[in-house]
Amino acid sequence: MKKLPIFLLISLMILISFGFILRSEDKKEEFKTEWKKVDKLVEKGLPKSALNIADSIFLIAKETENTPQVLKSLIYRISLQSQYKEEHLINAISVFEDELMNATVPEQQLLQSLLAELYLWYYQQNRWMINDRTALAEPGEEDISRWDAVRLNAKIREYYLASLSEQEQLEEIPIKEFSAILNVDKKEKDTYALWPTLYDLLCNRAINYFSTSDAGLAIMGSEHLLSDKYLVPVKEFIQIEMEDTDDQIELKLYQRLLTVHVKQKNTVALLDLDLRRLKYVYEHLAQNDKNRETYISLLESLSKKYRDYPVFVEIACELAKVYQQSGNMYDPQAGDKNRWELNKADSICRVAVNAFPNAAKANACQNLINDINAVSFGLRLNTVDLPDKPFLTRLDFRNVTKLYFRIVKVDAEKYREQALKRMDKDQLAIYVKNPAAYEWQVDLPDTKDHQNHATELKIPGLGKGFYLLFSSDTPDFDKEGNLNYNPLWVSRLSYLTKSDREEESFELYVLDREKGTPVPEVTVTTYRTVYEPRRREYTTRKLNTYQTDESGYLKMNTPTDDRSSSFTFSLEKGGDKLFSEGRQHIYYSRPDDQFRTKTYLFTDRAIYRPGQTVYFKGIVVDKKGNDVKIKPQFDVSLRLMNTNYKEVSSLEKTTNEYGSFHGAFVIPQGGLN
């Protein structure tokens, strides 16, 4: 059972208090002492004791017609019961709907918005179960525990839209009058400017819901892209005549609220909302150069208009994100298109942060700067290379002009055990100090574009063994800096593997890595990685040792002490050693001591279309190891399922004297979705 989240409780308390304080001309008892006791009991994990006090407040508040405290105590009751009572959300919905029956403006709209949120929270808590339902409930069914996702979201939608009635009255109620109740963090003081009225609050809550994918569940029909006619300046947008269709509700809400702020000339609220509107429209348009350029043009126009206001940072941040997205699509093989877009994003953010370092979006801009300028590099090399022969590797790099490399030889078995535990920076710092087999540095071009680039490096020939190749942007390979490493084997040995599940065996061919010829008399040692509960770590245990024959071939039985497992192996001959790449997975069954029934089903084709007939034939056998017997006169149940694993139709069949059966299903015209 999940508890009612704190953020929901707070929003319920704050929002419902708004409306009733508006109507309270006389100062009412706030029960500060009592509520402190309630909060302390909650902190101690005593919800039932806290509920007793909340209920006593409710009785007094009800008698004195102290509506804010009545509702506050009701909300506390719901929250506290959520910690120990089943179906607390259904109970909460019932309580709020009872209160709604006699509510007037603005309590009515607040309750409607909150009921929408309660229904949404109920859906989100039970999503996995609700989404698995078909439309079980009749249209008049009041038991929401039987509602499907479509009906629940239709109710959520209904309440959010209803909460926006009486718009003119709600526009006259300023939120700032209730700062003590809002308890807005000092860092979020701009909230009053962004949502100056109660209508702003309710409309934004509705917009937030309709921007989710859940809202679409109440609308039958497929999603489609928006028209680019909505990607226009705000004064043009509010003049567009919207179609009366369900899929344009969010645009209508943006239009209604933007119209209010244009008339009121509320710069901060208008710009914040318009940026969200532009972003919403752009994200729902066809992604092409034309729409991207229009979006950039609109953002640049806004940035020039509000260059001397702190809101400039918010515009700059969104504009930089668009340039960053374009820059991330740069393809060196396709020329210079998008190559310099990251520079534009970086420059825009730096101007914004320098101008208004304390603005709300300044940190977001700084994070973009940090991301664009982050140093990254890495090598792509083969896991194994031939001894005493130089080889090439690819180096990817970004925002770095010099790199340092060091190759050190390490004990493969010790490294394997350490890697199982965790290869942290401290362990790497120890390895990197080992005597270097080879070290060098490379100067890289200063591309000045913040893009990923690549070049090839020549690695000198190395003797047989296991190595770590370190790369760093500092000459001392400081563990606090950018330090990368790649494991590398140098060996003439290579191998091919094959596992046979039926025979519960594993086959191995060892070959010369350069010539491809078989390598005989190679010692093969198998290992298994196991978890030690007491030590809370993984360790490697040796299993068996084998040797390849004159053809470099080895066939071994898989272990039989577990239902399924995996293992690694090492190859060794004449000082040349190699560990397998990753784990070899093995599967096997426990020895059958009884017959098990198995059905083999065959269809006349692989792919079917809606309305077609699926002809099938089946054979039922009893199987114990390699002993197989047909199963005549055996009853078989068959079900045709849709993609949601719901039964579409079913058949009952009985096998004939040969243990077989046949039949047909017709796929519905609507398919199996």
Image (cartoon, rainbow, N blue to C red):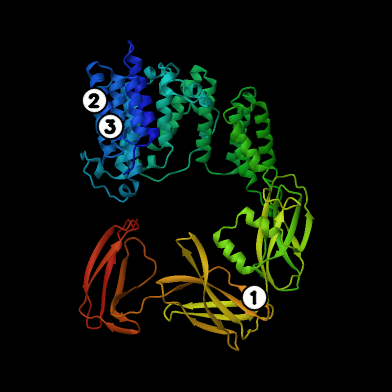
Q: Determine which quarter of the picture holds residue 604.
A: bottom left
The crowd level at tag 3 (other Cα within 10 Å; few <14, some 14-19, many 20+) is some
Kindly identify the amino acid type of the residue bearing the numbered disc 2.
Met
Provide residue 526's location: percent of width, then percent of height.
53, 76
Instruction: Compute the Cα span from label 1 to label 3.
Output: 69 Å
Secondary structure under the numbered disc 3 in the rendered image: helix
127, above or below 296, in the image: below
Q: Nearer the viewer, mark 3 or mark 2?
A: 3
Mark 3 is on which residue type? Ser
Front residue of 502 and 281: 502
Q: CA distance from mark 3 to mark 2?
A: 30 Å
- As drawn, the label of residue 49 is 3
- At label 1, the amino acid type is Lys
Left or right position of 506 against 351: left
Tell whether 636 sits left or right of 469: left
Image location of residue 114, percent across then percent down: 34, 30
Quadrant assignment, res 216: top left
Count of marks placed on residues: 3
Quickly name the residue at label 1: 577
* Mark carried by residue 87: none
Q: Nearer the viewer, residue 621 or 522?
A: 522
The C terminus: image quadrant: bottom left
Q: Which residue is mark 2?
A: 101
Q: Quadrant of the N terminus?
A: top left
Between disc 1 and disc 3, the foreground one is 3
Give the residue at the far top of this rendering.
Answer: 26
Give the mark, 3 or 2, whose residue is nearer the N terminus. Answer: 3
